[in-house]
Image (cartoon, rainbow, N blue to C red):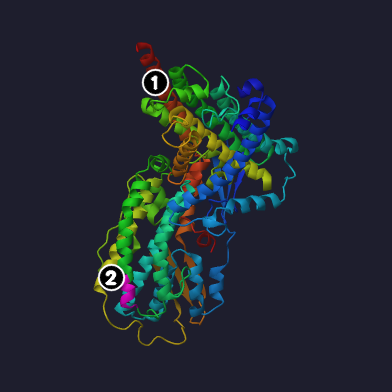
Amino acid sequence: MTELLGIEEKTYTLNLGPQHPSTHGVLRVILEMDGEFIIKAEPVIGYGHRGHEHMAENRNYTQFLPNLARVDYLHALAYNQCYCMAVEKFLDLKVPERAEYIRVITCELNRITSHLLWFGAYLMDLGAFTPFLYCFDDREHLLDLLDGLTGSRLTYCFFRFGGVPIDIDDDFVAGCRAFVSRLRSRWDDYNNLVTKNVIFINRTRDVGIITRDQCIKYGITGPILRGSGIPYDIRKSEAYSAYPEFDFEIPIGSKGDIYDRYIVRLAEMEQSCRIIEQACNQLPDGPIMAEKVPKRIKPPVGEVYQAVETARGSFGMYIVSQGDVKPYRIKLRTPSFANMSFFPEMAVDNLVADLVANLGSIDVVIPEIDR
Amino acid sequence: MELVAQLLGSEGARMVVGLIAVIALVSVNALFLIWMERKVAAHMQLRPGPMEVGPHGAFQTVADAIKLMGKELITPAEVDKPIFWLAPIVIFLPVLLSFLVIPFSSTWIIRDMDVGILLILAFSTLSVLSILMAGWSSNNKYAVFGAIRSVAQNIAYEIPLLVTVMSIILMVGSFKLTDIVAAQSGLWFVVVQPLAFILFIICATAETNRAPFDIPEAESELVAGFHTEYTGMRFALFFLAEYTNMFIAAAVATLLFLGGWHGPFLPGVVWFLIKVYAVIFLLMWFRWTFPRTRFDQLITFAWKILIPLAFVNLLITALVLKLR
C-alpha cells in the first residue's frame, strides 16, 4: 500500500518524560517509534542528580547519615543499616543483639511499605486506580507505627553507629503484630481483585521477560532476579545483622515475566511479616547501643564494603578511609541503576503500553539511579 | 397539564421546549454524574470524596464548572486552529441531538421517530470524528496516539454493538424506540437476551471510552490522550460530552433491555431514570475496579470474541423467531 502510494515509511521520536505520569519521578525515555511499536528506547537519567557521593567527601561520617535516606526514599532504613554496618566494620563495633533485632524489625516494616507502594503505583500504571488507595490505607498504619518510633514517615534517619538511639516498647511490638494480622487479612482481597484478574494477567504474563542469563549479565538483583528464578538474597547468601536467626524463604518465579515479579514481591511481603513476627516473639533484652562508641568517628586507613538487600535489590557501599574524619570516597552501588540498565533491551519491539508496564515492574526509584 | 399538552401539540413550541429541556438536562446530568462518579469512586476507595461544598459535596462540580469557565483557553502555537476550535463543538452537537429521540416515558419524548435507535447509533459514531479532529489538530504526538486509538477502537466496537442491537430489532420488528419499549411491557429483553445485554454493556463501555477500555485517554501512557492540549471550557466540553455519552449509552441499554419506563407504582420517568443511573453505576463500578486493557488486546477482543458472539446471538435470535 505504502509502495503504491509512493509514501516512505518513517519512524518518529517520542519523548516520554521527564514529566510524564508513569515515569515515577523525573526519568526521560527517548523512544524511536514505528507506529505503536518501540524500535529503540534510550533512558536519559540524571535529572535528579544530587551528588550524594561527592557530598560524602565533604562532611564527616555522622553528617552523611541523613543523606542515605534520600537516595532510596522508599526503603531508607536498609540504606541506614548498610552505612551503619559499614562504619561499624571499620570501627570494629559490636552491635548489641536487641539493637540488631530492632533494626531487622524496622527494616522489614520499611520493606513492606516499599512493596505496598510499588503494588499500588504499579496498578495505577496499568490503569487501576483503586488498589492504590487500599495499599496506602495499609501503608498508612505502618507509617504511623514507624513515625511513632523514629519521628519521620519517609526519610528515616534512625540507626546510629553501634545501635539504635531509641528502644522499642510493648506498644510498638503490639502494633507490629496488629499490622501483620491486618495485612494478612488483606491478601484475599488483593488476590481476588488483582492477582486473578484476567485483564491484569493478560497484561503481565509473558511481558517483559528477563532470562536468568540476562539477569546475571546486567547485574540485576532483587525481586527481578528472583522473579527469573535465581534465589539470591543477601539476607541469606551474605547474612547480616540478625537475619540468620530467622526462618524465612526466598520466593522465586519461573518465567521472569512481570507477573512473576509481581508474585515475588507479594510473597516477599508475607516473608517480611514472618520475620517481623519471629523477631517480636524472640526479642531479647539488653542494651541498644554498643559500648565505647567514639564521639568522633575517625576510622583507620583502609576500605570496607557492605551490602544489604533492599526492596529493589542489592545495595552496596564501598567506603575508602584515609584515617580522616571525612571519608575519602564513598561509592554507592544502587540496585535500580543496574536494574534499569536492562530496560532499553526490554522495551524494544513492545507497545508503549508495555513500556509503561515494564518500567513499573522494575520498581525504579529515580533518585537512586541518579544519586 | 392540559396547557402543556396543548403547547406541545404545536410543532414550534415543542421544539423550543425540547431544546431547553435537553440543554438543561445535559448540564444538570453532567454535573450530577461527575459528582456521582467522584462519590462512587471515593466510597470504593475507602475515602469520603468531596465533602466541603454543599451537603456531601453536592455543589463541588458546580464550583469546578465555574472555575473551568474562568480558565484561560490556551491555544498552542503549532495547532491547526480552525479544527482545534471546532472539535469540542463537534463532539457536543451529536450528543445533544441524540436526546431528540430518547423516550423518557410513554409521553415524554421530543420526537418519536421511526428510525429512533438508528439515529442514536449514527450520532454516537460522530463523536469519533471530533476525537480525531481534536487529536490531529493538537499537533501533539500523545494526542494523535489517542485519536488513532480511539478511531480503531470505535470502529471495532461499533460492529458488535450494531449486531447486538439488530437482534433486538428483529424481535420487535421496528426501529422505533417507543415500540421497542412497548414490546417489553411483559418481559424485559434482558431476560430473553442475556448475552446480548452483556455484549451491549461491554461495547457501550468501549464506545464511551470508559475504563477498562479508556485507551484513548490512558493516563499512564498518553498523559491525557486526545484532549491533552485543551484547557478551560474546551476541556469541559469534552468532559461534558463524555458524561452525556455515558447517559445516552445507559439510556439505550435501558430502552433496549431493561424495559424503559415500565415499572410498578412510580411514574414512568422515575423508573426510566432509576434504571439509567443504575446502568451508569455499573459502568462506574467497572472503571474503579479493573485495570486498563492493552490496545492490541482490546482490538483482538472485539474482532475475535465480541463480533463472532454477536453474530451467533443474532443467528440464534433469527432462528428462534423463524421457528416460533
Q: Which amino acid, by three-letter code, is at mark 1?
A: Val
Q: Residues within 10 Å of mark 2 (few under 14, many from 20)?
A: many
Residue B312: image location, x then y, percent = 39, 20
Question: Looking at the picture, does residue A39 appear above or below residue A85?
Answer: above
Chain of residue at mark 2 = A
Q: Which residues are magenta?
A: A168-174
Inter-mark Cα distance, 2 to 1: 61 Å
- Front residue of this view, candidates A337 and A286: A286
- For label 1, the residue is B312
Please tell me whether residue A363 is drawn above or below residue B307 in the rendered image. below
Q: Nearer the viewer, residue B183 or A82?
A: B183
Q: Quadrant of the C terminus of chain B?
A: top left
- Give left or right: position of A311 versus A343: left
Residue A17 x %, y %: 59, 51
Q: Main secondary structure of the magenta part?
A: helix
Q: Nearer the viewer, residue A350 or B124?
A: B124
Dot label at residue A279: 2
Extreme-top residue of the structure: B323
